[in-house]
Image: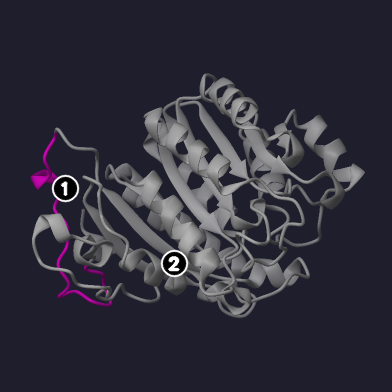
Amino acid sequence: MDFSTLSVDIPATAWTGRNDGESPAHRRWWQTVAIAATSASPDAPSLNTASLNASLPGPAALLGFASHAGVARNHGRTGAATGPAALRAALGSLAFHGTREVTDAGDIVVSGDSLEDGQARCGAALTAMLDAGYLTCVLGGGHETAYASYLGVAGTAAFTNGARLGVLNLDAHFDLREAPVPSSGTPFLQMARAEAAAGRELNYAVVGISEPNNTRALFDTAHELEVKYLLDEDCSAERTEGFVSSFLETVDIVYLTIDLDVMPAAVAPGVSAPAAYGVPLAIIAAICRQVAASGKLFHCDVAELNPEFDVDNRTAKVAARLIDTLLR
């Protein structure tokens, strides 16, 4: 793929991290990720997918969405715009045990009140990469990232040719809020309405819903849209595995979105809305392995990392581990 055709605001730059050696046995993420050539950095090496080993999993691409405009509109704690950089830093020194080629495509930046434009540009970049055969992962950013991801997936040939899409959200919140303008609380209602306008129904499931943190109006909307959900208190290993398995049976491709506030505040303190209860990390990691092993993972994103409120980079490290699990 020619990454120089993508319209990014900040080109990818070389990653850094601990160096234990240059051999494949010593590889870490920072030594593995290829830096995409873009229109703003035409001299960077661009990955040629034609040269990839066909016996290995397909290539993956990372795209940052540096935004907290939606969080601000939703009256949350801002700071998630610096999430992509913190995620790359946390990923960089992790040992790389995967077999995929991974390319960093740089960042889309939302400034001022340009959220909708940023979402559209992010979506266009994702569609191009998905149609080129990449498993894409957006590094957020507030959960307004989700609508950008949806736009990217909805524009692909696979989706327009009839693939059954499932949206699986790991989140304490439905994010089905009715509001005058789009925000981090509205993306899945936006998706449902976009699907309805196209004559389809959104197949949406959520793991980790916090009953005290979602109003009755939000539960009513979820029931009207036939959203499948599992409350945080019901997220045992067995029930969660069965819930996700049933959902996977209904879809051909999965867009998996992880709002880091789904986990307990002790595990993920660096988010806009820390969870008083939350789903254990072991359960969230198991879901990631289950979805990846299904062969149906099409696109994923990680949202709501807010480095300003993180503790010892705890949330960033948790998020990095989940990305490492998904992209193996």
Q: Secondary structure at mark 1?
A: helix
Res 205 visible: yes
Which x, y percent locates residue 126? 40, 53
Residue occupying the point 28% across, 42% down: 133
**Along the horizontal axis of the image, is 222 left or right of 215?**
left
State which tag comes first along the sequence, 1 or 2: 1
**Along the horizontal axis of the image, is 287 left or right of 202?**
left
| Tag 1 near tag 2, CB within 8 Å | no
* Callout 1 amino acid: Thr
Residue occupying the point 16% across, 47% down: 49
**Along the horizontal axis of the image, is 99 left or right of 286?**
left
- Cα distance between the residues tagged 1 and 2: 25 Å
Q: Nearer the viewer, residue 34 or 225?
A: 34
- Quadrant in the picture for the C terminus: top left
> Of tags 1 and 2, which is closer to the observer?
2
Which x, y percent locates residue 251? 51, 24
Q: Nearer the viewer, residue 36 or 112?
A: 36
* Callout 2 amino acid: Leu
Quarter of the image for residue 282 reads top right
**Along the horizontal axis of the image, is 307 left or right of 183?**
left
Q: Which residues are magenta?
A: 37-54
Question: Outermost residue toward the right?
Answer: 216
Q: Which residue is mark 2?
A: 87
The reply to whether the magenta stretch includes residue 95 is no
Q: Which residue is mark 1?
A: 49
Residue occupying the point 13% across, 35% down: 54
Q: Secondary structure at mark 2?
A: helix
Which x, y percent locates residue 167? 57, 37
Res 8 visible: no
The reply to whether the magenta stretch includes residue 39 is yes
- Residue 140 lies, with reference to residue 43, above or below; the image says above
